[in-house]
Image (cartoon, grey):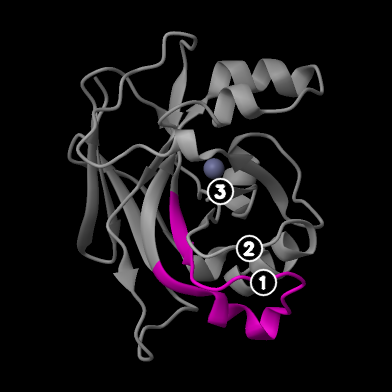
Amino acid sequence: MKIICVGRNYADHVKELGNSIPDEPVLFMKPKSALLQSHTPFYYPEFTNELHYECELVLRVCKNGKYIQAKHASNYYDAVTVGIDFTARDIQDELKSKGLPWEKAKAFDNSAVVGKFITLTPDFNRKSIPFSLVKNNVKVQEANSSQMIFSIDRVIENISNYFSLNIGDLIFTGTPAGVGECVVGDVMEGFIDTQSLFTVEVK
Ligand code: ZN
């Protein structure tokens, strides 16, 4: 499996990092080794001094496909959850300033936290999915999928022009505003609506 991530998909987050609104989705990937296995602790990586959380809606791919049209995209995922795209922001800033790839900042071991999946039923409203992140009992990120610059369907269409989607792949759909630093001892809990889907502590 692979993990495909969308960058800069919420206008308020694009603004907070001083980036410009993209014309098409910004994509990057994390390898399978980036997935934090459940019941495994997350350890603060030794190569960064500025670890950021980015809470994102995550889709689970249920069908193989390539060149998927947006109007058919909903057939290609069958479950959603929230996750964290852990980012070594200091490393990313340095790489960005040199025009280098982001992998060291984004794709390191255990950098992808994925919550418990909610299997989608026909009555689930895929166009309006509210989600949030609570850090140490304070809500730090809150958004709705309807605020995405590129909708889920358009994201799937764009990804599949470049990368075949395979059953079991995960798609991180971008983070809203409110990203910030986390330190050892922080406890983060991710929600879709009022449903708690993961808790992770930084060790
Ligand atoms: Zn992200």
Kindly identify which numbered label has been placed on residue 165. 2
Q: CB under 8 Å between callouts 2 and 3?
A: no
Q: Which residue is mark 3?
A: 2
Q: Quadrant of residue 90?
A: top right
Mark 1 is on which residue type? Answer: Gly
Which label's residue is closer to the chain start, 1 or 3? 3
Q: Is residue 200 left or right of residue 140?
A: left
Q: Is residue 86 left or right of residue 101?
A: left
State the residue at coordinates (67%, 71%). 65
Which element is circle 3 on? loop
Q: Residues within 10 Å of mark 2 (few under 14, many from 20)?
A: many
Which label's residue is closer to the chain start, 2 or 3? 3
Spot occupied by residue 52 in the image (x, y as percentages of width and height): 45, 28
Q: Is mark 1 within 8 Å of ligand 1?
A: no
Of residues 10 and 55, the one nearer the viewer is 55
Q: Quadrant of residue 135?
A: top left
Q: Which residues are magenta?
A: 56-79
Mark 2 is on which residue type? Answer: Leu
Spot occupied by residue 48 in the image (x, y as percentages of width and height): 48, 12
Spot occupied by residue 8 in the image (x, y as percentages of width and height): 65, 47
Q: CA distance from mark 1 to mark 2?
A: 5 Å
Q: Is residue 30 left or right of residue 53?
A: right
Q: Residues within 10 Å of mark 1 (few under 14, many from 20)?
A: some
Ligand 1: quadrant of the figure: top right
Which element is circle 1 on? loop
Which element is circle 2 on? loop
Q: Which residue is mark 1?
A: 65
Mark 3 is on which residue type? Answer: Lys
Spot occupied by residue 127 in the image (x, y as percentages of width and height): 50, 78
Which label's residue is closer to the chain start, 1 or 2? 1
- Residue 112 colored in magenta in the image: no
